[in-house]
Image: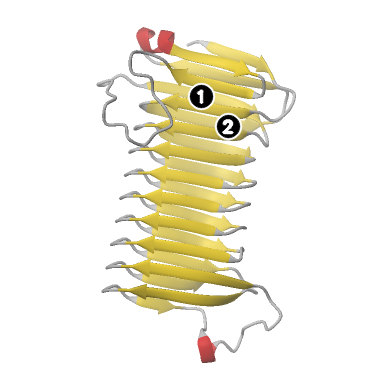
Amino acid sequence: MPEHRFHTPGPIELEVKIPSGDIELETRDGEESIVWVEGTEKLVEQTTVELQGNRLVVQLRGKKPFGFTIEIGGFSLGSEKLRIRAQIPHGSGAALATASADMHVDGRLRALETRTASGDLLVRGEIERDATVKTVSGDARIDRVGGDFHATSVSGDLRVDDVQGSVHAKSVSGDVRIGAVHGSEATLQSVSGDIQVGVASGRNVDVDANSVSGDLSSDVPLGSDAGEAHADGPTLVLRGKTVSGDFRLVRG
C-alpha cells in the first residue's frame, strides 16, 4: 500500500478526485500530512499524490480523467475501486469529487466542498466555516457547520445537526433536516422530500412557507401566538417551499 508523506507545518488545501471506492479523511495535530492509496496495481499506478505549494492533490489520471463535475455518466471502472486515506492538520480545507465513493471525515476542517453522484458523506466533527454539498443520490450527514451551508440534492437525504450561519438547500425527492439554524437566513426547497428546520433558542423567526399537497406544521409559536418572542433578539428569515413534501418547523 503506497504511503505518501509531506511536511506541512500549517493547514493545507486537500483535493481528492476519484471515481469510486472510499475516501477517509482525518485531521490531527502535527506538521505532517499522510496519504495512503489502496486498490489494484493499475489504479494505484494511475493515481497521483502531489503537494503543490499549499495544495495536496490526489487524483486518478487516465484516458478519461475525472474532474469536478457532477455529470459522471461516461466514466466507468467496473468493479475496480480506490481507497484513499488521508491525515492532514486541523483547520485544513478539503474539496472531494467522486462518482460513487463514500466519504468519511473525522476532525476539524476549515471548509468543505463535496461533489458526488451516489457516494454518501459522513462528517463527524466540525466545519469551521462554509460547507457546500452537491449530490445526486448520495446521503449527507454533518455534525456542525460554523459558517453557511449550501446543498443541492436529487434523491439523497441531507442532514446537519447545527449550522451557525445561513442555510440554502434544494432537493427533489430527498429529505432535508437541519437540527438548529443560528444564522439570519434559511431558504429550503423540495419537490417530494420532507423538510424539517430547527430554530435556535432565543431567535425570532419570520416564516414564509408553503406546500401544494404536503403538511405544514410548527412547534415554534408564530404570529399572534409568538408570546415567547424576544423583541430585541435576532431574527431568522425562513423561506420554505415544497410540492408534496411536508414542512415542519421546530425549536432547535
Residue 41 percent across, percent down from the top left = 38, 7
At mark 1, the secondary structure is strand
Residue type at mark 2 is Glu
> Residue visible at 62% across and 83% down?
229
Residue 182 percent across, percent down from the top left = 61, 64
Query: Which label was assigned to residue 236?
Result: none
Query: Which label was assigned to residue 85?
Result: 1
42 sits left or right of 112 in the view: left
238 sits left or right of 228 in the view: left
Q: Please tell me which residue lies in front, 252 or 184.
A: 184
Q: Please tell me which residue lies in front, 65 or 160.
A: 65
Identify the image quadrant of the C terminus. Answer: bottom right
Q: Residue furthest bottom?
A: 224
Q: Is residue 219 above or below residue 55?
A: below
> Residue visible at 55% across and 71% down?
237
Q: Is the C-beta separation of discs 2 and 1 under 8 Å?
A: yes
- Coloring scheme used: secondary structure
Q: Residues within 10 Å of mark 1 (few under 14, many from 20)?
A: some
Q: Quadrant of residue 75?
A: top left
Q: Quadrant of residue 117?
A: top left
Residue type at mark 1 is Arg
Along the polypeptide, which appears first: circle 2 or circle 1?
2
Q: CA distance from mark 2 to mark 1?
A: 8 Å
Residue 136 percent across, percent down from the top left = 33, 44
Q: Please tell me which residue lies in front, 178 or 238.
A: 238
Q: Residues within 10 Å of mark 2 (few under 14, many from 20)?
A: many
Residue underneath mark 2: 26
189 sits left or right of 80 in the view: right
> Residue visible at 43% across and 46% down?
140
